[in-house]
Image: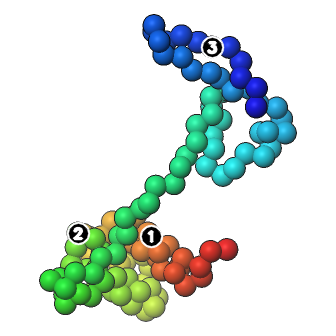
Amino acid sequence: MKMKGVSKLGAQTRFRIPIKTSAEVQREQVGVVILGRLKIENFPMPRESVVVSDPEILGGTPCFRGTRVPVDSLIDHLEAGDSLDDFLDNFPSVSREAAIAALEEAKSLLTGPR
């Protein structure tokens, strides 16, 4: 990758704007975003699980973080044919994002990397 020009942002601060060839742009990896000519990389951060198991809460039954709602209640609702919205209506302390994240965690545990 070629670097073009040096811009000053004060007495000692400098940055370079990368200039990419079309072949380099095509080889970009997932998580890299090009904004104009500035390259911003997205490094995955370890994500805290939305499912916690604490012996002091429901005897260690896996629950949604920050709640006393067992994760298996989500599975039971879906198994019974209820929608995600039905589950969320019954358990307002669980956010939609947390419910989806729990399902994604379960999926990744069952299917592994692809």
Residues packed near mark 1 inside 10 Å, few (<14), some (14 to 19) or many (20 plus):
few
Residue placed at 58% from the left, 42% from the top? 41
The residue under label 2 is 66
Label 2 vs 1, first from the N-terminus? 2
Q: Could you tell whether 2 is left or right of 37 in the image?
A: right
Q: Which mark is residue 100?
A: 1
Q: Which mark is residue 6?
A: 3
Q: Looking at the rendering, which quadrant does residue 18 occupy? A: top right
* Viewer-side label of 1, 3: 3
Farthest residue to the left: give it.
56
Q: CA distance from mark 2 to mark 1?
A: 16 Å
Q: Looking at the rendering, which quadrant does residue 84 occupy? A: bottom left
Farthest residue to the top: give it.
11
Q: Which mark is residue 111?
A: none
Amino acid type at image mark 2: Gly
Amino acid type at image mark 1: Ile
Helix, strand or loop at label 3? It is strand
Q: Could you tell whether 87 is left or right of 114 in the image?
A: left
Q: Is residue 81 above or below residue 67?
A: below
Farthest residue to the right: give it.
23
Quadrant of the image containing the C terminus: bottom right
Residue placed at 65% from the left, 23% from the top? 17
